[in-house]
């Protein structure tokens, strides 16, 4: 029992490391626009984002954590080894894409790794089709909602500016202030969805190890996950900030306000429905929508399509790494 408990504790630490890399990797989503528009310095921006990432648990429940922990994979077939290999696959994929400066999805890496390890352990029968149907649907819906809202918000903003006859200087002044609010709004949404994924994995681990009799998320798991993602955000993710903030389309403060607000609303919808979505997908869709509202050629679609290709490979890529890891480590677990 002592050795088993130590192994469980070790895997919990690994899960929190994943949460940390999630915050580090997805910090760009929270701060790219606010940094690229020079509303905040990089240091100020990560502190701002990290704070709202952490306090998100006060506002939201654990619907996403329940989906991740017991809605995608039959929990009775989940073992400690499955959790370990799943996390390993997700972390390795995250680090690989971070090194390459590619804004892929930590969320999809996690569910891909979890599924890959579970299938390697018990076959395709461990998959819960109903859970995956909605999850996969939101892979498409979430960024599309972000894109449409970004386009709509930018169009409305331009209409209001035109009819109010505001000077460019006045628009820049109020939009820079508004972006502080929209960046906080987006960071709150990011923390509400992404940290819950690790909560679900840790709770599934505790159930599979026999330390919990039912899937009920303890408060210490909530606090640990929120702290890890907040600290990860504080560490930054400057390679991806550059891609998200400037390579898709050139951003101004008013553009950042529209993109962040559109993204936050899309993520809030998914969180309330218990859907684990990619915050990277959503903010990219929103930025693209804002750019397209100016003119279609304002968006560097080649960069966007490159990201889409990486996203398509994320779930199967992380799944294959996790499955291989499980099969290699199975004799010692």
Image (spheres, grey):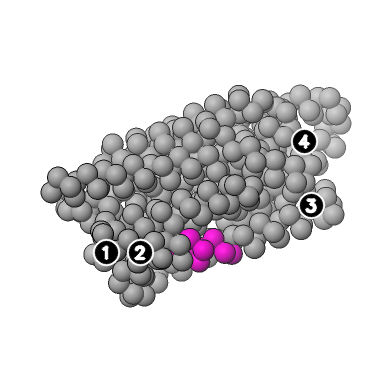
Asked if residue 3 can be seen in this view, the reply is: yes
CA separation in Å, label 4 and label 3: 14 Å
Q: Kindly identify which residue carries mark 1.
A: 331
CA separation in Å, label 4 and label 1: 55 Å
SS at mark 4 in the image: loop
Task: Pinpoint residue 202: horizontal percent, then vertical percent.
Answer: 31, 48
Q: Earlier in the sequence, mark 4 or mark 1?
A: 4
CA separation in Å, label 1 and label 2: 7 Å
SS at mark 2 in the image: helix
Is residue 16 shown above or below 175? below
Q: Which residues are magenta?
A: 312-319
Which one is in front, 122 or 51?
Answer: 122
Q: Kindly identify which residue carries mark 2.
A: 328
Task: Pinpoint residue 146: horizontal percent, then vertical percent.
Answer: 63, 52
Q: Residue at x 85, y 37 (%)?
A: 162
Dot 2: within a 10 Å radius of its alpha carbon, few (fewer than 14), some, or many (20 or more) residues?
Answer: few
Q: Earlier in the sequence, mark 2 or mark 4?
A: 4
Q: Kindly identify which residue carries mark 4.
A: 252
Q: Earlier in the sequence, mark 4 or mark 3?
A: 4
Magenta span contains residue 218: no
Which one is in front, 148 or 77?
Answer: 77
Q: Residue at x 76, y 58 (%)?
A: 302
Q: Kindly identify which residue carries mark 3.
A: 299
Which mark's residue is nearer the viewer, 3 or 1? 1
Which of the image's four quarters has the C terminus? Answer: bottom left
Question: Is label 1 in contact with label 2 (beta carbons under 8 Å)?
Answer: no
Dot 4: within a 10 Å radius of its alpha carbon, few (fewer than 14), some, or many (20 or more) residues?
Answer: some
Question: Is label 4 in contact with label 1 (beta carbons under 8 Å)?
Answer: no
Asked if residue 63 can be seen in this view, the reply is: no
SS at mark 1 in the image: helix
């Amino acid at each position: 029992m002592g050795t088993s408990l130590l192994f469980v504790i070790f895997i919990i630490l690994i899960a929190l490391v994943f949460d940390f890399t999630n915050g580090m990797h997805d910090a760009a989503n929270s701060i790219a626009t606010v940094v690229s528009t020079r509303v905040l310095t990089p240091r100020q921006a990560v502190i701002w984002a990290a704070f709202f990432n952490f306090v998100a648990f006060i506002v939201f429940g654990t619907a996403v954590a329940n989906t991740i922990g017991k809605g995608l994979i039959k929990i009775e077939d989940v073992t400690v080894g499955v959790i370990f290999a799943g996390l390993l696959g997700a972390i390795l994929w995250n680090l690989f894409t971070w090194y390459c400066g590619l804004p892929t999805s930590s969320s999809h890496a996690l569910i891909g790794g979890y599924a890959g390890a579970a299938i390697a352990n018990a076959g395709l029968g461990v998959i819960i089709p109903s859970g995956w149907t909605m999850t996969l649907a939101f892979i498409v819906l979430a960024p599309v909602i972000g894109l449409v809202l970004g386009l709509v918000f930018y169009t409305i903003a331009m209409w209001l500016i035109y009819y109010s006859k505001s000077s460019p200087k006045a628009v820049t002044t109020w939009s820079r202030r508004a972006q502080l609010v929209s960046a906080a709004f987006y960071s709150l949404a990011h923390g509400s969805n992404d940290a819950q994924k690790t909560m679900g994995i840790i709770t599934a681990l505790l159930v599979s190890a026999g330390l919990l009799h039912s899937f009920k998320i303890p408060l210490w798991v909530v606090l640990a996950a929120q702290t890890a993602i907040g600290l990860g955000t504080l560490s930054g993710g400057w390679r991806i900030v550059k891609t998200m903030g400037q390579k898709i389309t050139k951003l101004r403060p008013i553009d950042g306000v529209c993109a962040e607000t559109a993204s936050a609303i899309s993520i809030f919808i998914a969180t309330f429905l218990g859907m684990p979505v990619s915050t990277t997908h959503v903010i990219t869709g929103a930025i693209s929508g804002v750019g397209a509202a100016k003119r279609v050629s304002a968006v560097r679609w080649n960069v966007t399509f490159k990201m889409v290709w990486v996203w398509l490979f994320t779930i199967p890529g992380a799944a294959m790494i996790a499955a291989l890891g499980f099969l290699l480590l199975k004799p010692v677990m």
